[in-house]
Amino acid sequence: MTEFFHSCTTNERKREIEELLNNFAQQTGAWRHCLFFLSNTRNEYVMMYSLTVFENLVNKQWLGVASQDKMEIRNCLPKLLLAQHKVMPYFIRNKLCKVIVDIGRQDWPMFYHDFFTNILQLIQSPGLASLGLVLLKTTSEELACPREDLSVARRDELRKLLLEQVPTVLGLLTGILESYWDKHNVMGTTPPPSPTSGEDVELLGSLFQGSQYSKLLCQPMAELDQDSHQLCCLVLESLAHLFSWIPLSTSITPTLLASIFHFARFGCDLRTKANLPQSAEGKQDRARLGVLAMTCVNELVSKNCVPLDFEEYLLRMFQQTFFLLQRLTRENNSHTVKGKLQELDECYLEKFTDFLRLFVSVHLRRIESSPQFPIVEFLALLFKYTFNQPNHEGYFACLEIWTVFLDFLTTKIKSRLADRESVLNRYKDALGLLLREVLNRIQFRYNQAQLEELDDEALDDDQQTEWQRYLRQSLEVVAKVMELLPSHAFTTLFPILQENLDVYLGLQQFIVTTGTVGRLNISAENDCRRLHCSLRDLSSLLQAVGRLSEYFIGDVFASRFNDAVAVVERLVEVTCYGSQSIHAPPRHHAQALAALQAYSHWLAQFYSEVQRQNQSRFVSLITSAVDASSPLLTPKVPEKLLLSACHLLVSMASTVRPVFLVSLPAIQSTFRLITENNSPGLPPEAHMLVCRALSNMLLLPWPSLPESEQQWQTRSSSHASLVAALTRDYRTLRGTTSLPQGSTELGNMKAVMQQTLPVLREVVDSISGESTKSRQICYQSLQESVQVSLALFPVFIQHPDVTDEMLSFFLTLFQALRVQMGVAFTGQIIHTFLSMFTREQLAASILQEGSAGCRVVQKFLKILQVVVQEPGQAFKPFLPNILSLCMEQVYPIVAERSSPDIKGEMFELLYQVLHQNWRYFFKTSVLASVQRGVAEDTMENEAQFTAAMQAFGQSFLQPDIHIFKQNVCYLEALNSKHKLYHRKLFRTSMLFHFINVLLQVLLHKSHDLLQEEITLAVYNMAAVDFDAFYSGFMPEFLTGCQGVDSNQRTVLARNFKLERDLPSFTQSVHRLVNDLRYYRLCNSSLPTGTIKL
């Protein structure tokens, strides 16, 4: 063993030693040698190896060990533990304890009747209590929550046996905690109370209603010696594990709860009984006790199922925890609250925050209305705790608690609209304070030092920086308060925004111009700092105002109109200022545009309200907003600002849709910019957004106007001109029949295609959900470009970067305009695609996973999905070719490869073919089904149906969990919509194969995340004919199971109850899978020729 772990030993020699050791461990009676080694060596490697041999023997080969040997092992190992536990290293002691507990797991109570009694005796023996506690905790871990190497019956038996012992165990543990507390905290020796003690008791009045524990909890803390500390830690660790699985009941007595809370104080009390200075180690030990005690509390609080007789205990528990919260948030002469929290152990604070989160999310609804629980005082304590957190993570965690509380309050108010006001009045002050403090926390003006620490460059998994996350979470709280108290929130927020806007708009007077260059003339350091803070705050407040836009629309539009119009007019003013002043900071200008865009739904509602009235105020707002955006549409503007302007323009065109928008001078000049100079140098994304906005102005119906006033004819010709200008270069490629030789010319052609097709796709995509008229006009304008695209497709088939773009365009066309394209032309497109995608072409594309070629095939399959979903007979003639492409060309290439993207699309296409075209396979005469009462299957295209089902079945034998889940869902959907499992062909030749495959998957645990879905599918398949399942399938399945003997098969069959409801059936399946795995595990570990006892 020493040679094996020596640094100079080669890997080859290590393998030799490993083989020798494994062979030794497999020998019958090897355990006797190991027992000798354990008794006579101090070498840790040898001891650990010997214990591993015992562990393997007990867990895997115990069935085959002679009863005399078992008895000897049961006697020797506990004796060894008792004799040597003090001199053994702790990890060897723990391993030996685990082996003894493993024996108990197999043999208690039948063959090892004193297993648990011995543990209880050890706990009660003064010198051996810690050993007993280690055994108790290990027993809780290994017997209450066993791994799968036990049968279900044995698991249930062990849990039942343990539950019988719980009251005794909890009584013993309570006794230990109480005795150690009393021993170190004798009341008589307590010094006179400190000046703060009286205040403690007084403050607790409302929380405790004169509880008997209030004075006890106010006593100064005891100092525990090292042994006492160690023992109390072991008790609390054992309790934490016990609480994780035992149900809440009166066995958890008030005395036990009070004892746990005494120790929870160790985490939050800085002073000891004698108020002596402590070593760092002493502080750490006390914090550990506090952490373990809070872990116990959290285990209890995390349980949602609370019996009626436990509710009073729960209330008492919360009272005691809030006593601790009071201690944590109390200021005194030597410590501020924040200073106090900073001194505490980080782990303890995390546990305490976890407790508060669990309390608010799980139990607040139970406790909130109790007269004994002062909810408003609790919120005041939570407020102090939140805003004195020593680090950002702690603050985030507390903000989440407030979010849960605000959600609870919102739900409560919605369910009790009658007394909405009385509920809100109760919490109004707390919510007002929360809002103001959260707003202060995001402002540099009040919180610069902390906010400067936040990183604003590195992105996290959600693609946001630390500062963005901080701001977003804070604004979510602001928004939730706004939903509850809209007027109050607005009057708090708007003046702060106004103040910062005044600073921003007043910058103009400090600009000094020299020649053509301007600079900001502010030199005083203090002024520069204030300006920096004000501009950072303006940025945050603009985001806040944008986030709150949803609370001004809908039913509250009229009542909140004045507030909203004040915000929008101010935002329009800021955007106009930004566009006119060359010195406006781009970041703030972009955010003002984004905030204004957030109010586009409000502007749309404003427009519909003033449709037949005086529109001057509305026209003025829209005109100014457009005038502010259009000068920014040039490549000289920073991209972030340019995109904000483009998005605002798109919202004006798509959401607000004013009639007069197209005729505004600024929009006319934008039309000219785009049409006269096809590429005005804008970045691609900005160019697409501008084209989308211009197209939508001409295509989307104007709100609240009858069809006769929509001016479709004029708009149609304008749109045709716009598209003609956008596709000018693209349409010149029409006659191309072969690719040019020169790389420059080919590059130019590709560039034209890759610039034009995304714009056309954007135009089509934006009207996909609109009226027929909009789509007709769109298709008329695009018709020539579509034909050009189809003609060019065969020419560029070997260039996946171009065909990828083309198929993206065709996919959007099929999704939005297939009706307008007509059957004949659509058929021509499909025919062209099917003829171009030969087996060789597909193979070349699919084999390069993640390439453009792969994406091309994906999009082609998506187009076919759209085609097969089309109702009516028009595209039915393509079904044979589509199925043939799927099953004969694509499937053979991807069957044995992972190819997740292609497979996913191919199986979705197969599902859509089956679902939307069921009668292609099953012709059911309505008359026949009425006469017989059951639909008689008349099967057509059987070979293709069978091939599709085999492909689904094959996918269940492969490791890809996403495809597996998708395909189980597809089969279940086909069954619920078309009774797939009941069809004669499926029932007679496929059903049992599918059940068998799904059960094997459960047995191999390869797709454990999908247990629920797989079991449901097995149930639905079995439910087709339960009698056949129980009498035919199950015996056959068990007979075919390898690795079990006939007696075990009989037990498995007997335990699979003949139930027909889903919960019982699910239980039987889980039991079958667990026990079958258990038997195989035991059988495979036994040496050949072993007689099982």
Image: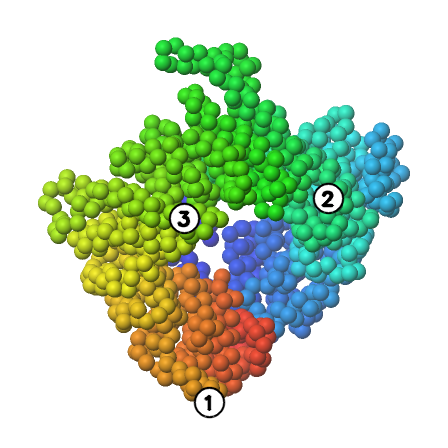
Depth check: 739 or 1034 in front? Answer: 739
**Residue drawn at the location 46% of the way across and 70% of the way down:** 972
Figure quadrant of the C terminus: bottom right
- The residue tagged 3 is 710
**Mark 1 or mark 2, which is nearer the start of the sequence?**
2
* Residue drawn at point x = 13 percent, y = 52 percent: 737
Residue occupied by mark 1 = 931
- Which sits earlier in the primary sequence, circle 3 or circle 2? 2
**Image marks 2 and 1: residues in contact by CB distance under 8 Å:** no
Asked whether residue 630 appears in the rendered view, the answer is: yes
Q: CA distance from mark 3 to mark 1?
A: 54 Å
In the displayed structure, 820 sits above or below 576; it is below
How many angstroms separate mark 3 from mark 2 (CA)? 47 Å
CA separation, marks 2 and 1? 64 Å
Q: Residue at x 62, y 39 (%)?
A: 560
Where does residue 939 sit, x and y in percent of width and height?
35, 82
Q: Residue furthest left?
A: 741
Q: Residue at x 52, y 62 (%)?
A: 53
Secondary element at image label 1: helix
Taking the image as shown, residue 295 lies to the left or right of residue 605, namely right
Placement of 426 over or under 436, stated as above or below: below
Discs 3/1, front: 3
What residue did someone put label 2 on?
424
| Amino acid type shown at disc 3 | Gln
- Within 10 angstroms of label 1, few (less than 14), some, or many (20 or more) residues? few
Q: Earlier in the sequence, mark 3 or mark 1?
A: 3
User: In this orientation, which residue lies closer to the viewer: 127 or 274?
Assistant: 274
Foreground disc of the pair 2, 1 = 1
What type is the residue that disc 1 sits on?
Gln
Mark 2 secondary-structure assignment: helix
Q: Residues within 10 Å of mark 3 (few under 14, many from 20)?
A: some
Q: Are marks 3 and 1 in contact (CB under 8 Å)?
A: no
